[in-house]
Image (cartoon, helix red, strand yellow):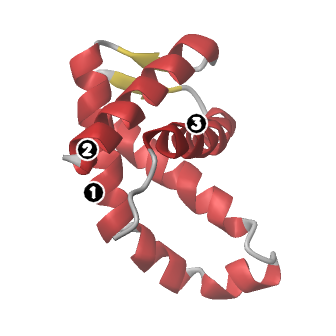
Amino acid sequence: MKLIFKLLLTAVAVVLLAKLLPGIEVESYLTAIIVAVVLGLLNIFVRPILIFFTLPATIVTLGLFLFVINACIILLVDNLISGFAVSSFWTALLFSILLTILQSVFYSILGEEKA
């Protein structure tokens, strides 16, 4: 059940950022939900592979290269989903940073139950 709430909160964050940032366009709320699902899947399967292959650059930049990886994943989502558009790499970089911040705020509001 928490997974569904997290996906919906991510979709809300995508819609909010699309309204705030001029280079991001989301066609509908359903598209935002699809973006959240695809983004989650890419973060599970593709992101670890990218991190592994770019490990030297990540170490040299003290982890700042991870922001570039996040922006590349956002651009990949842009290419995979037709109702979602990102204008440039820099917009994707800013979008990924703001999305991470919004997700942290939303997930802290949701709260984690300790077992």
Horizontal relation, residue 21 to residue 37: left or right: right
Residue that carries the numbered disc 1 in the rendered image: 41
Residue at 63% x, 18% y is 21
Q: Which mark is residue 102?
A: 3
Q: Is residue 81 visible?
A: no
Residues marked 1 and 2 touching at CB (< 8 Å): yes
Label 2 residue SS:
helix
Horizontal relation, residue 95 to residue 65: left or right: left
Give the amino acid type for the residue marked by disc 3 in the picture: Leu
Give the amino acid type for the residue marked by disc 1 in the picture: Leu
Residue at 36% x, 43% y is 77
Label 1 residue SS:
helix
Residue at 69% x, 38% y is 90
Residue that carries the numbered disc 2 in the rendered image: 37
Question: Distance from label 1 to label 2 (Cα)?
Answer: 6 Å
Q: Is residue 107 visible?
A: yes
Horizontal relation, residue 91 to residue 109: left or right: right
Residue located farthest toward the front when viewing the structure as drawn: 115
